[in-house]
Image (cartoon, helix red, strand yellow):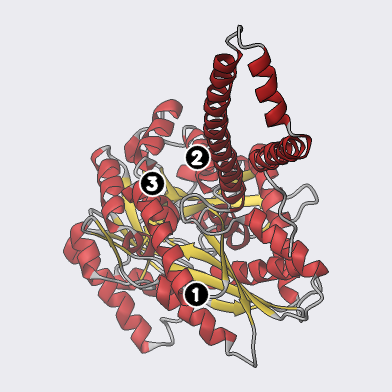
Amino acid sequence: MPRIQPTRPQMEIVAWLAVFLLLFCLSWFLQWHEGLDRFIEKHHDYPLDHALLALNISGFLGLIYSALRIRDLSREVNRRLQAEKNVDWIACHDTLTELPNRRFLDSVCAQAMTDQREETYAVFSIDLDGFKKVNDLLGHDHGDAVLKTVAQRLSSLFPREHVFRLGGDEFVVLARRTGNPDLVALGNRIVTVIGKPFTFNGVAVDLGASVGFALYPENGDDLGQVIRHSDCAMYVAKKQGRNLVKSFVPSMQDELAKRIRLEADLRAAIKKAEIVPYYQPLVDLKTNRIIGFEALARWKTASGEFIPPNDFIPVAEEAGLIVELTDQLLRHACTDALSWPSELVLSFNLSPIQLSDRLLGLRILKILGDVGLPAHRVELEVTESAIIQDAVTARIVLDDLVNAGVGIALDDFGTGYSSLSQLSNYRFDKIKIDRSFVSSFETDDKQDKVIKAIIALGVGLGVTITAEGIEEESQLQRLQELGCDIGQGYLLGRPAPAEKLATGQVSARICNAVDGAAVCQL
């Protein structure tokens, strides 16, 4: 038991009592009272008795005053001690959710290093899916309410365990293990509990969670290291999808380290503008003329290695770099397009995550205005899944762009939700048939019928149809027979940097087919 230190008021009371008892004993043994009576009687001409009475009364009043002051001082000391305790609590807890914070977790890890008990833990790292959208669309008040509710749900699920909020939408659960519990099932319970519907002020909020877990001491002698391992597993779960639970395995460390290096290199590449647009021709299949180019992001490192877009685009989205990268690439592409013949169109892909940004349309139109490229020469490609993720914001953004004269193409049609309501609710200028259909439609009768149906749909709606991934001469001929409007693929031209467009090195086949028109004269 820790020794309790007496407070200053308590010490002063003890000292006063000690002095009082000492004087009382001396007065008793030395007969001070009788001697004082004799002295007063001897000098009765002086009002000593009245003076002593006044002194006694003053002393008694002073005693009362001292007692009141000691009481006030005791209260002040108690308030001060309570304030110090509150400061310690605030330093070790998240003020919003009242859960322990990272500092508290660090102290638990330090205690585990010196604890002689052989405790075993399961560490769950939890990151909310869709929380940023709640903040962006509904405001931080709703976001705070969501975090409080998540904290309450986790605390209810783990009433006797430590639940921490480390910041943002990241939580950690430190659960003691007894026996051989099914931790994957427990992780799925976390996902289920967090995923229950939220309703705030009549607004429904859809939320998910990515969960990773690691074991102490199996996955590390240091509890802090095990927490980092569970965080690594959580990152892998988040990367692979929504509402997933992953157990830590050592190979995840290599993947995380690779991702961290890639993110650092990506930041440097964006800062140095090393990621540039390459251009792939869009060909009118009825006239064999190039009608425009699609800008595709290409990252060539200092060593001459090309990093595939499928590797660095997801990292840019997760690291919050996609807006800066997109703006940089679009400005570059628009500047290049100024040197093309005025009838050529620039096609540019938008990341799905960007359609949740209400300011996207304004930024795009500002870039077009700064560069001086007319809006009708720009066509933006969006995917079906991007529209479904946040239909309200996507509708606002796309309507703003269409009203400004920018063309909109529905990319990868047939691979997502393929809802006809999308075609009726949004004003698309073009539908792009995904390359997965084009690659096999010659040998797969069902795929062939799908392409026929899409082309017929385009004719009925008055929407241009583009086929991606044309790599064989037979594919080109078949699409022309079916009445497809525009083609794109390696057969018609590979992506090339702007300087090759200027020298007519995009595609010898197209240059011959169009008899030196358009691109070969750039």
Element under disc 2: helix
Residue 392 placement (x, y as % from top left):
26, 54
Q: Quadrant of residue 370?
A: top left
* Residues at circles 1 and 3 in contact by the CB criterion of under 8 Å: no
Task: Write down the residue under mark 2.
Answer: 327
**Residue 333 against residue 505 in the figure, above or below:** above
Among numbered discs 1 and 3, the one appearing first in the sequence? 3
**Residue 198 against residue 288 in the figure, above or below:** below
Of marks 2 and 1, the one in the foreground: 1
Between 22 and 469, the one lying in front of the other is 22
Residue 237 placement (x, y as % from top left):
57, 72
In the displayed structure image, the side of residue 137 where residue 297 appears, left or right = right
The kind of residue tagged 3 is His
Task: Write down the residue under mark 1.
Answer: 159
Near mark 2 (Cα within 10 A), the count class, few <14, some 14-19 or many ≥20, is some
Q: Quadrant of residue 518?
A: top left
Among numbered discs 2 and 3, the one appearing first in the sequence? 3
Cα–Cα span, label 2 and label 3: 26 Å
Among numbered discs 2 and 1, the one appearing first in the sequence? 1
Numbered badge on residue 140? 3
